[in-house]
C-alpha cells in the first residue's frame, strides 16, 4: 500500500483515537552478517545454542493478525532480514496484506533480482545504515570488508528503480566529522539522509557500545553544527515551541507521555515476544501462546507502559529541562535499570540542546538550570550509572535469557 504522508498521518490519528495499533516493528531475525561495533541487539556467539526463530508459517499467521487488528505501518527488520531464506516470501506476504511497508537492511544482499522484487512491493522506504562517506571509516564500524561498496551499490540499484532510500547514521565520536560528507553523498545518490545522536547499551545491559558516544566537546559541536538548523526550525522564532517558551508554557506538560511506545506502536521479536518498542525489551506477551489482539488489549505490562506520564517519572517530573528532553523508556530501563526513572544520557543531551539554544538567543541567558540527576551524569556519556544495589541487568531483562 503506497500512501502519501498527509493521508497516513490522518489514518494514524484516527487509529489512535479508536485504540487500535498503528505501527508494528517486526524483527524477523537477530542474525546478521555484519558485526557493527555499536549494535544494541543481542547476538548469540557462533556455535552457541540458538532459540528457534519464528517459522514462515508463524510469521504469516501473525501478519494476518496484524492486518485484522488494523495495523497500518509495518517495519520489517533484523539483524539482517535477508539472512532468512524466506525473506522474499515474507516481504511479499506483508505487501499482499496491504501494509505500508518499511524495510531495514544493510543492503548486502540486495542484488539486481532482489531490487526488482522490492520495486514491485512498493515500500514506503528502504532504510540502510551508512556510517561514513568512504569505505575505510565505514568498515571500521561494520568490521566487514567490502560492506561500504555493497551498501552504496544497493542504494543505487533501488533508487534506479524509484524505491525511496533513506541512509541512516548513528553519530559517534569516530564519525561526527563525516556527517557533512555523508549528507552530500546521500544527495548525490538521490537518497534521503538521517542521523541519530544516541548510542545505546546492548539490550542485555552490556554497556560496551557507550564507549563510542560523543564526548562532551563533540556533543557541543554536534548541536552547534549538524543540528543547528534543526534546532532553529524546531525552537526558533515563529515556531510553536518558541511561542510556548516566551509565554512560560510547558512544552512537556506533566500529563503528557515522553514516548509513544506501546500506545500506538509495538515491536515483535524473532521469537514471538511482543515488546512496547524494539528499544524497550520488556516482554508483554508471546505470539506463540497468545493472539496479537489478546496482548494488545490485555497485557498488564503494556498498560503500565502506556500510563508512563512525565508526572510518574522520578526526577523527570521535577526537571526544568523537560522542554529540551527526548527521554527514551528503553535507555532508562536498560542503562539505569528503572523504567520509571530518568535516562542519564537523555539528561546530557537536554543540557546540550538548551545550551545551544541559549547561545542562539532562543532561550534566555539566565536559563541555567540543570537536571536533578546532574551529579550522576558522566559528561562524556561513557559510564551509565547502575542502581545502588549493583545489579548489572534489570530484573525485567533477565527473564529474556
Image (spheres, rainbow, N blue to C red):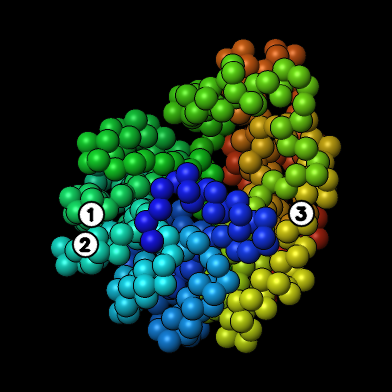
> Which residue lies under the disc numbered 1?
158
In this view of the protein, which residue sits in the foreground, 97 or 357?
97
In this view of the protein, which residue sits in the foreground, 64 or 321?
64
Q: Along the polypeptide, which appears first: circle 2 or circle 3?
A: 2
Q: Are marks 2 and 1 in contact (CB under 8 Å)?
A: yes
Q: Residue at x 44, y 41 (%)?
A: 195
Q: Residue at x 75, y 65 (%)?
A: 303
Give residue 353's quadrant in the image: top right
Place of residue 235 in the rendered image (x, y in percent of width and height, measured from the top left):
60, 24
In this view of the protein, which residue sits in the foreground, 195 or 205?
195
Q: Quadrant of the C terminus?
A: bottom right
Q: Residue at x 60, y 41 (%)?
A: 381
Q: CA distance from mark 2 to mark 3?
A: 41 Å
Q: Along the polypeptide, which appears first: circle 1 or circle 3?
A: 1
> Which residue lies under the disc numbered 3?
308
Indicate which disc residue 115 carries: 2
Give residue 251's quadrant in the image: top right
Amino acid at each position: 500500500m503506497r500512501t502519501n504522508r498527509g493521508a497516513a498521518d490522518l489514518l494514524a490519528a484516527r487509529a489512535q483515537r479508536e485504540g487500535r495499533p498503528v505501527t508494528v516493528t517486526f524483527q524477523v531475525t537477530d542474525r546478521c552478517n555484519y558485526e557493527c561495533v555499536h549494535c544494541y541487539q543481542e547476538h548469540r556467539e557462533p556455535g552457541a545454542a540458538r532459540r528457534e526463530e519464528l517459522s514462515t508459517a508463524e510469521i504469516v499467521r501473525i501478519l494476518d493478525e496484524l492486518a485484522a487488528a488494523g495495523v497500518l505501518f509495518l517495519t520489517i527488520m533484523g539483524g539482517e532480514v535477508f539472512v532468512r531464506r524466506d525473506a522474499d516470501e515474507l516481504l511479499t506476504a506483508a505487501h499482499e496484506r496491504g501494509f505500508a511497508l518499511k524495510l531495514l537492511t544493510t543492503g548486502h544482499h540486495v542484488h539486481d533480482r532482489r531490487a526488482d522484487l522490492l520495486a514491485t512491493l512498493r515500500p514506503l522506504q528502504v532504510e540502510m545504515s551508512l556510517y561514513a562517506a568512504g569505505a575505510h571509516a565505514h568498515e571500521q564500524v561494520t568490521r566487514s570488508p567490502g560492506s561500504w561498496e555493497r551498501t552504496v551499490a544497493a542504494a543505487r540499484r533501488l533508487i534506479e528503480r524509484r524505491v525511496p532510500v533513506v541512509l541512516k547514521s548513528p553519530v559517534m565520536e569516530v564519525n561526527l566529522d563525516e556527517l557533512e560528507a555523508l549528507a552530500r553523498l546521500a544527495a548525490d545518490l538521490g537518497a534521503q539522509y538521517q542521523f541519530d545522536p544516541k548510542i545505546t547499551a546492548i539490550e542485555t545491559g552490556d554497556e560496551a557500545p557507550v564507549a563510542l558516544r560523543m564526548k562532551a566537546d563533540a556533543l557541543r559541536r554536534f548541536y552547534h553544527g549538524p543540528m543547528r538548523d534543526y534546532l532553529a526550525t524546531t525552537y526558533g522564532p515563529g515556531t510553536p515551541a518558541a511561542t510556548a517558551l516566551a509565554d512560560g508554557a510547558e512544552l512537556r506538560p506533566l500529563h503528557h507521555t515522553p514516548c509513544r511506545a506501546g500506545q500506538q506502536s509495538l515491536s515483535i521479536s524473532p521469537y514471538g515476544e511482543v515488546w512496547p518498542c524494539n528499544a524497550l525489551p520488556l516482554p508483554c506477551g508471546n505470539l506463540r501462546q497468545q493472539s496479537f489482539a489478546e496482548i494488545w488489549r490485555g497485557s498488564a505490562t503494556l498498560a503500565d507502559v502506556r500510563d508512563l506520564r512525565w508526572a510518574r517519572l522520578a526526577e523527570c517530573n521535577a526537571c526544568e529541562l523537560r522542554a529540551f528532553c527526548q527521554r527514551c523508556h528503553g535507555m532508562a530501563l536498560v542503562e539505569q535499570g528503572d523504567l520509571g526513572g530518568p535516562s542519564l544520557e537523555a539528561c546530557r543531551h537536554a543540557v546540550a540542546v538548551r545550551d545551544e539554544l541559549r547561545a542562539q538567543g532562543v532561550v534566555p541567558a539566565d536559563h541555567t538550570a540543570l537536571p536533578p540527576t546532574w551529579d550522576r551524569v558522566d559528561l562524556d556519556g561513557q559510564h551509565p550509572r547502575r542502581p545502588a544495589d549493583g545489579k548489572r541487568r534489570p530484573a525485567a531483562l533477565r527473564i529474556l535469557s
